Image (tube, rainbow, N blue to C red):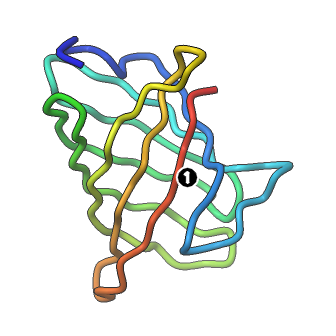
Amino acid sequence: MSDRNLLNGRTFIMISSTASEVNAVDPTRFAYEEADGLIWGSYTGDTVTHGRFVGTRDDDRIEIMYVHGLKAGGRPSGRSTSRIESLPDGRLRLVEEFTFDGDDTPQTSVCEEA
């Protein structure tokens, strides 16, 4: 996965998370941008009104920092490390290990390319 703009313009949909139940009707959607290994983007849906992330990608590893607003109130932030996997149909899957600032409980989410 050496393409330096691999994630640019791709959208991913959350399919599972240990931090919350995923809403099948309105799952969180992540829009990625990438330029030479620098990544950034936004996300919304499920419990999130609006979120932003920024980070880096080296090969199949992503490291980001994020913050988002919750529909129920509050603004959680944190860090994550994701592994990029290729699906048999050519789409990508992101397997993310993350923590919220102020809470060391490890969480895991899985997103698949839309």
Picture residue at 46% right of the left edge, 73% below the top = 75
Q: Position of residue 16 (x, y in %)?
A: 62, 58
Residue occupying the point 47% across, 61% down: 68
Determine the image quadrant of residue 62: top left
Q: Which residue is mark 1?
A: 50
Quarter of the image where one finds residue 65: bottom left
Q: Quadrant of the N terminus?
A: top left
Quadrant assignment, res 23: bottom right
* 91 sits left or right of 2 in the view: right
Residue toward you, 44 or 27: 27
Q: Nearer the viewer, residue 60 or 72?
A: 60
- Under mark 1, the amino acid is His
The quarter in which the C terminus is drawn is: top right
Q: Nearer the viewer, residue 55 or 93?
A: 93
Instruction: Report x, y in % for residue 56.
Output: 17, 38
Residue at the farthest front position: 88
Q: Say whether residue 46 is left or right of residue 58.
A: right
What residue appears at the point 57 percent right and 36 percent down from the top-left corner?
Answer: 112
Q: Which residue appears at 48% of the width and 35% of the height?
A: 93
Residue extending furthest toward the right: 25
Q: As displayed, is residue 67 above or below residue 27?
A: below
